[in-house]
Amino acid sequence: MNEKPILDADGQAPSASAEMRSKTALAAIASGTRRVREAVGRVIVGQSEAIDLALVTLLAGGHALIEGVPGVGKTLLVKTLARAVAGEFQRIQFTPDLMPADVTGTSVFDLKTQAFRLVRGPVFTNFLLADEINRAPAKTQSALLEAMQERQVTIDRETCALPAIFVVFATQNPIEHHGTYPLPEAQKDRFLVKIRMGYPAVQDENELARLVAENEGPESRLAGELRAPVLQPGELEQLRSATAGVRVSDAVSSYIVSLVRQTRQHAAVWIGAGPRATLALLVASRALAVLEERDFVLPEDVKMLAAPVLEHRMLLRPEFEMEGVEPREVINAVLEAVEVPR
C-alpha cells in the first residue's frame, strides 16, 4: 500500500534530516517504554491489557481506576510500576473513618516554635494508591479532586504544589456493596481510564503457581529484578513530553468527537460522556500509539481505548440497567454506528 508523505506545519514534506531526527526520537521513546513494559511483565504474570492501560495512564499524565476482585494483583501492579520508573509510592487504605486531613495533611501547632507547622499527607508522592476508594464517604473521596485535576492541594488556605509526576491509582472491588459509597460522577470523570483486572488465564495461573513453588513469586521478583529502576529520574518526564507530540490527524480527532457525542444520543444512555472524555480519549490514544512505537494515532487506537475511557463516564437509564445492559455494550454499539475514517 502506498503511504502519503507526512507534511509539516507548512504543508511541505519534511527534509531527510528532520525525518531522521524524528525516527531517532521515536526509537528512544520506544526503547524506554519497552523496558518498562518488559520489567512490569516479569513481575505481573498475565494481565497484559492491564499493564498496557497502566502505562497509557502514566504516559498520558492521567489517573486510573482499577476494578477487580481481591487477589488479582491490583496493588502489586502499581507498586511494580512505581519501582520501574523510580517513583515514590504511597498507599492509603480508604475506610469509613478516614478523614480528608488523613489524605492531604494538616497544620499542627509546634510548641517549640510557637507557630503552626504544615504536616504533609501521603498525597505528596509520585504514585498514590487509593486502596478500596469506595469504602470512604464522599467527603474523604473529594479530598483527591483538587489533587487529581490541578496537581495541587490546599491545606488551611495554603496551596501546595504536588510533584510533576503525580498519578492516582484507585482500586475498588466490584462484588462488594456492603459498607461502600459509590464514587460521585465528578470523581469518576477525573480518572483517565478504568482498568478491569479479571482472573488470569489458566496458563498464567499455572505459571504463577510454578513460580511461587520455586520461591520466585511476584513479590520476590519485585524485590530482586527491580532492585534498580528501569528508567532514571527525569526520563519519564521526557517520555511524557514526547507523547504530547504524537500527531493526531483532523480525521481521527473528528472521529473521537463523534464517538463521544454519540454516547449522549444512544437510547440506553441517561447521561453521556462529557467534553473531558473527548480530551481523555485523545491523549490516551497518543499514549497507546507510543506503546505501539508510532508517532501518529490510528483509528484502531481510539477503538481499543473507547471502553476503558468512556464506560465509567456514562450513566444508563434505569430501565436498561434493570434489563442487564452494560456500558460496554452501548460503547460497542456506538463504535459500530460511527464511521471509521480511512
Image (cartoon, rainbow, N blue to C red):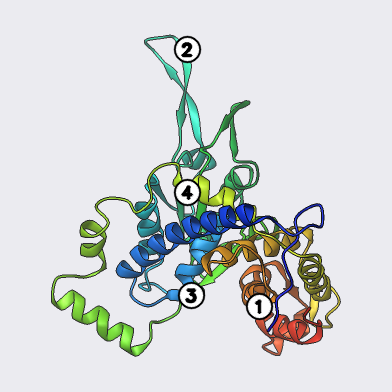
Figure quadrant of the N terminus: bottom right
* Disc 3 target residue: 49
Q: Position of residue 287 (x, y in %)?
A: 58, 61
The furthest residue to the front: 16
Q: Secondary structure at mark 4?
A: helix
**Foreground of the two, 150 or 123:** 150
Q: Secondary structure at mark 2?
A: strand
Disc on the earlier residue, 2 or 4: 2
Q: Mark 2 belongs to which amino acid?
A: Ala
Q: Against 106, is 103 above or below?
A: below
Disc number at residue 300?
Answer: 1
Q: Mark 3 belongs to which amino acid?
A: Glu
Disc 1 versus disc 4: distance between alpha carbons?
Answer: 25 Å
The furthest residue to the right: 265
Figure quadrant of the C terminus: bottom right
Label 3 crowd (10 A; few <14 / some 14-19 / many >=20):
few
Residue 166 visible = no
